Every structure is written in C-alpha cells, then in structure tokens.
Amino acid sequence: MVSNLKAQTDNLFQELITLLTAESKFDSYNSQFLQYVQEKHHFIQQNTDEAEVLEAIRGINRYSDEFSFTDINTKKIKVTIDNLYNLANRS
C-alpha cells in the first residue's frame, strides 16, 4: 500500500517542487515551503509506515496556508497540494 501511494504521489511532488522553485525566485520566503516539501518528499521515499506517510502529506497541506504565491502559479500549486491531500485521505 505504501509503495503504491509513494508511486502515485511522486509525480505530484515533482510538479509541486518545480512550481515552488519558480515561486522562490519571486519571493524568497516561499523557499521555506519548498525546503519543507523537499524534506517531506525525501521522508516519504524513505518511510514505510503508512500513517507517517499520510501525516507528512497532510502536513504539507496545513503548512501551505502560511504562504502566498503569484497569480501565475497559485491555482496550480493549490490543485497539486489538493491532489496529494486527496490521495492521502483515500488511503
């Protein structure tokens, strides 16, 4: 189950990291969120405990509320985070 969830989320993480990298160029404060997402992605890749994987994904959703993004990427970032969150909640 965890490996299936990891496979499903990997593309979403890559998309989110790409978007946040672009956002960090506009506002350096967003680099904190980028670093957090990268750490959680690495954590999920290394972890086999389903509950911890799901909580890491939920944490990204909660923490994202502290950041604002450019009009260009806001919707894409929110949709990607929502997709990660929905995958976590379906599991």
Image: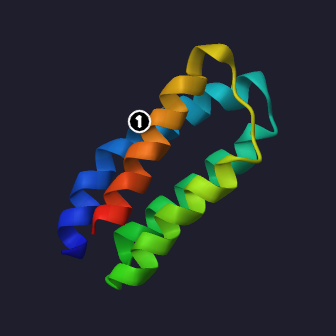
Q: Kindly identify the amino acid type of the residue bearing the numbered disc 1.
A: Glu
Q: On the picture, is 64 further left or further right than 18? A: right
At x 63% / y 46%, what residue is drawn? 34
Judging by the rendered image, the residue that carries numbered circle 1 is: 15
Is 78 left, or right, of 90 in this rendering? Answer: right
**Horizontal side, residue 43 vs residue 32: left or right:** left
Q: Is residue 16 above or below residue 76?
A: below
The C terminus: image quadrant: bottom left
Numbered circles on residues, count? 1
The residue located at (52%, 63%) in the rendering is: 58
Where residue 80 appears, as percent x and y from the top left, is: 44, 38
- Name the outermost residue toward the top: 72
Task: Give coordinates of residue 16: x percent, y percent.
Answer: 48, 39
Q: Position of residue 76 (x, y in %)?
A: 49, 27
> Relative to 68, is 63 above or below?
below
Q: Residues within 10 Å of mark 1 (few under 14, many from 20)?
A: some
The residue drawn where x is 38% and y is 45% is 83
Left or right relative to 27: residue 79: left
Secondary-structure class at tag 1? helix
Looking at the picture, the colour scheme in use is rainbow
Q: Position of residue 29 (x, y in %)?
A: 81, 39
Residue found at x 25% / y 74%: 2
